[in-house]
Image: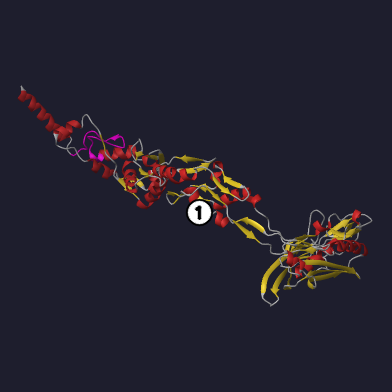
Amino acid sequence: MLLGIVAIALALYLADLAMHRGNVPRGTTVGGVNIGAMKPDEAREKLESELGGIADEPVEVRAGDKAATFVPAKSGLGIDWQGTVDAAGVETANPISRLRGLFTTREVDVVPRIDEPALKRQLDRLTDELHVDPTDGTISVKAGKAETTDPVSGQKVDRATLHDETTTGWLNPDGIDIEPIEIPPAIDSAVITAAMDGPVRAALNGPLTVNGREDHTAAIPEDRLGEVVSFPNEDGKITPRVNTEAAQGILGEQLADSEVETQNARVLAGGGVEPSVDGTIVDWEKTMAGFNDRLLGDKPRTWDAEYKEVPAEFTTDDANNATFDEVVGSFTTGGYSGASGTNIAIVAGTVNGAIVNPGETFSLNGFTGPRGTAQGYVESGIILNGRADTAVGGGISQFATTLYNAAYFAGMTDVAHTPHSYYISRYPAGREATVYEGAIDLQFRNDSPYPVRIATNVGGGQVTVSLMGVNTVNVESINGGRWAQTSPQPVYVSGANCSPSGGAPGFTTSDTRIIYDLAGNEINRETQTTVYDPQPIVRCG
């Protein structure tokens, strides 16, 4: 009986072996297509028929939580149909393997056709899209407390693995899964813990207090320590950064009342001298020495401020010995109308005798105060929107121009001046100034070591302003010429007060002031550029 069964099985095995000799092994699939037990040519035709368009379908690649897609046909990938069937092999003579093929399947990867240059471009993109930069942990100080953010690892994919998986596994209907490689952050939990237990704990260990003179005390309270110290990530480390300037600012506000302000002496216009006062200020260089060790190290967080004397630069003796015998700078203008002359005389008389002490800034508006009818000023001609008009105080800009030039040649520091919008021919181009009460001022500062007295003279159709004192410099003015001319445009004005004019072109000019010491050595050179608008052609009617 047993021999009969064996004989039958052997006969079946031999018949199957003869029937399927050279066929693809049973249970073989490619891209989900069953080609088992088929002749190679039939298997190739079936694969081409069922998978011929699959290279145009997008394939998803996953790595960790990231995913990206690519289209094989656009990525230089195709299928070597014959090569794939050849790779599937042929049915073995091993009866156990043949029997297993009846009940199991095996997926065979395609043999790809690869255009490496085209594939490289896609792999570059996929590598980038599957890449995640790590996130460093951080420490910040808010309201005197340290707050942290947790570090987060990043990931990358191995380029060789990505190449292998995409070229061989892109037919998998479930897509491609790649195990990412972890990229640890530079600032990880260990680094955060070490910083929190070290410099952070030290820095936030209570306020910093400085004892000043006369029971004055200054402190940087805990809730303001974040203004003084921070813990940025630098080169893979948490490095304490101390803002000594901010700390000094906080302490300085509180110790200001312990200081004595230095005051230079002042020569008074009415006679006499306001004496100088030597000052005392906190010596911040010495006071803040070792501040980092107090904040982050073991030095005491309470210490005494150091002070230093600051003598007046212009002393009482200097003021008592001041002389006003030399012309430091002087200028004269003319060509004004009678009404303008009235206003010029009033403002000149007001300013005459004014003293500008060393370090002081003279303000024409501030010195004269209001310039209205109550002060005797009258209505006179002005230029408004490029044409003639009148206003109370007209002509004061001519005095401002004269004063500006006197200060210019005296080497005074220009603080504020505004040229006219339109060029007025009786003034030097690019070296003139206008004023308007409450809005436009003329200001200059006396940075010389000697006081100056403003002396004015009005008469004979001219106004002269001189700065008297001790001359220490010579001044040269160089005009840069005129360029970028602009043409005037006509405007039509109605009314009996219309005054026709032919207009004037606008232009751009520059002025360079060179200041020399008395030995002829250049001290300073500065150039100012002025743009004048064209004065319109006024037509009445």
Q: What's the residue at 65%, 60% (across, down)?
A: 310
Magenta stretch encompasses residue 416 = no
Write down the quadrant of residue 57 in the picture: top left
The mark tally for this picture is: 1
Magenta stretch encompasses residue 33 = yes
Q: Is residue 521 visible?
A: yes
Residue 20 left/right relative to 373? left
Q: Is residue 53 visible?
A: no
Please name whichever residue, 130 or 368, is drawn nearer the observer in this view of the structure.
368
Residue 484 left/right relative to 110? right
Q: Amino acid at mark 1?
A: Gly
Q: SS at mark 1?
A: loop
Q: How is the image coloured?
A: secondary structure
Residue reaching furthest front?
214
Dominant SS type (magenta): loop
Q: Which residue is mark 1?
A: 290
Please name whichever residue, 220 or 394, is drawn nearer the observer in this view of the structure.
220
Write down the quadrant of residue 269 in the picture: bottom right
Please name whichever residue, 513 or 131, is drawn nearer the observer in this view of the structure.
513
Viewport quadrant of the C terminus: bottom right
Viewport quadrant of the N terminus: top left
Residue 435 pos. (x, y %): 81, 59
Q: Which residues are magenta?
A: 22-41
Residue 428 pos. (x, y %): 79, 69
Residue 325 pos. (x, y %): 80, 73
Residue 193 left/right relative to 536? left
Residue reaching furthest bottom?
519
Residue 186 pos. (x, y %): 40, 47
